[in-house]
Image: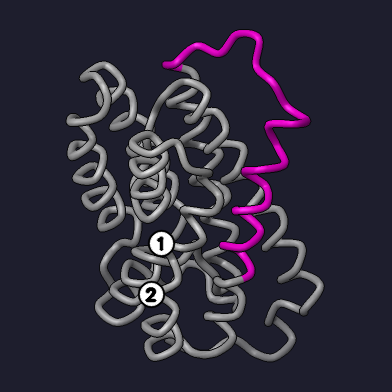
Amino acid sequence: MQAPSPSLKHKPYEDIQALVTGSLFVAFGVLMFGHTGLLTGGTAGLAFLAHYASGWNFGALFFIINLPFYGLAYKRMGKAFTLKTFSAVGLLSVWTNVLPSVVQFEQLNPWFSAVMGGLLMGAGMLILFRHRASLGGLNVLVLYCQERFGWRAGKIQMAIDCSIVLCSLALVDWHSVLLSVLGAVMVNQTLAINHRAGRYITL
């Protein structure tokens, strides 16, 4: 794939805007999922499972679970990617603690939560991916596989996410698991359709 010209590369302020916006979109989706008792995949899904099982703060758990993956990110994807990913994870951890104090749902249908929350998370992740960032953890592996082997990021992520959600049957009821799978599909269809190797080359 031909490298983009310097004039096409994202400027620092554009990357900052993307990190703030993308992480905020994902955090709002997480807020919707948390309000309706749904789960998602990736390290966020693992953090949800730990949160439901222990009652500990989701944002703190998400940040801690991602720590071991930064070495892989640095080795496989480079310094800039790792720094932006670390920033995105930190921002998401902050947003998930701030949003409940400024946004409260009087009524939120679980089916709508699964669809809309999933779309928001997918759009947020797409913004981050297009600025060479991720939400850490399994996102790093997924992006590496797409760049190295040309595999669709959305399809790989969907398989992983659905597997994590299905493992949650021990903690939540089957109806919540079903809706969580729907949410995972919405997240990853957004990525599969809009984030294909070679379609978007600005870095």
What residue did someone put label 2 on? 68
Residue at screen point 25% across, 78% down: 149
Residue at screen point 60% across, 80% down: 83
Going by the numbered disc 1, the residue's amino acid type is: Ile
Q: Quadrant of the C terminus?
A: bottom right
Residue 141 point in image, percent of width and height: 32, 71
Residue 40 point in image, percent of width and height: 37, 40
**How many other residues sit within 10 Å of disc 2, few (<14), some (14-19) or many (≥20)?**
few
Horizontal side, residue 176 vs residue 112: left or right: left
* Closer to us: 74 or 11: 74
Going by the numbered disc 2, the residue's amino acid type is: Pro
Which residue occupies the extreme right position in the image? 13
Query: What kind of element bears circle 1?
Result: helix
Magenta residues, as a range? 87-111
What residue did someone put label 1 on? 65
* Closer to us: 200 or 129: 129
Kindly indicate whether the residue at mark 2 contacts the one at mark 1 (C-beta within 8 angstroms).
yes
Rendered position, 45 above or below 182: below
Residue 102 point in image, percent of width and height: 78, 30
**How many other residues sit within 10 Å of disc 1, few (<14), some (14-19) or many (≥20)?**
some
Which numbered marker is on residue 104? Answer: none
Horizontal side, residue 54 vs residue 96: left or right: left
- Tell whether position 109 is magenta: yes
- Tell whether position 64 is magenta: no
